[in-house]
Image (tube, rainbow, N blue to C red):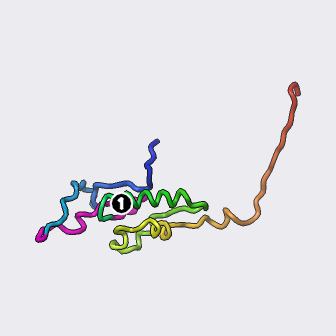
Amino acid sequence: LYTLPTPCLATTIDDDGVPEGPPPPPAVEGSNVTAKEHLFAVYIGNTKLHFTSKRRAQHFCHKVAKEIAEDPGDNEWDADKLKHLAPHRKTDMNATTFVQLTRKDPPEAWTTGTKRVLVIVMDWMSGD
C-alpha cells in the first residue's frame, strides 16, 4: 500500500496519453512555444489542473491536503464538480477555491433521524 503526501498526482502525459518531455525554457520573444506548453499539470482524482510552475502546483497540493485534514466535518470532496469550469479557471486555482467548489456535504440521513443502539453488558467471575 502506498499513499501520496497530497491528493495530487503530477503528470507528464498530455490529454491524448502521449508522454511529454520536460518544459522548455521560458519563451523567448519571437519563439513558437505557446503558453500552454509551459503549464505544469497535476491530477486530483480524474480532474486535471494546470499551474504556471511546479512550485505553485506543489504549494496548491499541500494547502489542499491541509484544508481537507483540518476539516472537522464528515465532508467529501469531489473533483468532478470542476468539470464544468472553463479551462482558464482551472489554471493556477487556489486551494481555498478548490475546497469550496468541490466540498460535498454528507447525506442528511447520516446526521438526522432516529437511531437504534443495542448494548449488551456481560460480567463474569473466574470459574463461572
Q: Residues within 10 Å of mark 1 (few under 14, many from 20)?
A: many
Taking the image as shown, residue 103 lies to the left or right of residue 113, namely left
Percent x, y of residue 24: 19, 59
**Residue 30 placement: quadrant:** bottom left
Which residue is at a point 34% across and 68% down the rendered structure image? 91
**Secondary structure found at label 1:** helix
Q: Residue furthest top?
A: 127
Look at the image and give the residue range highlighted in magenta. 29-50
Is-magenta flag for residue 84? Answer: no
Percent x, y of residue 115: 76, 59
In this orientation, which residue lies closer to the viewer: 72 or 103?
A: 72
The C terminus lies in quadrant: top right
Q: Which residue is mark 1?
A: 57
Percent x, y of residue 58: 37, 57
Is-magenta flag for residue 38? Answer: yes
Numbered disc total: 1
Instruction: Note whether 116 is above or below 103 in the view shown.
Output: above
Which residue is at a point 46% across and 60% down the rendered structure image? 64
Taking the image as shown, residue 58 lies to the left or right of residue 32, namely right
Q: Amino acid at mark 1?
A: Ala
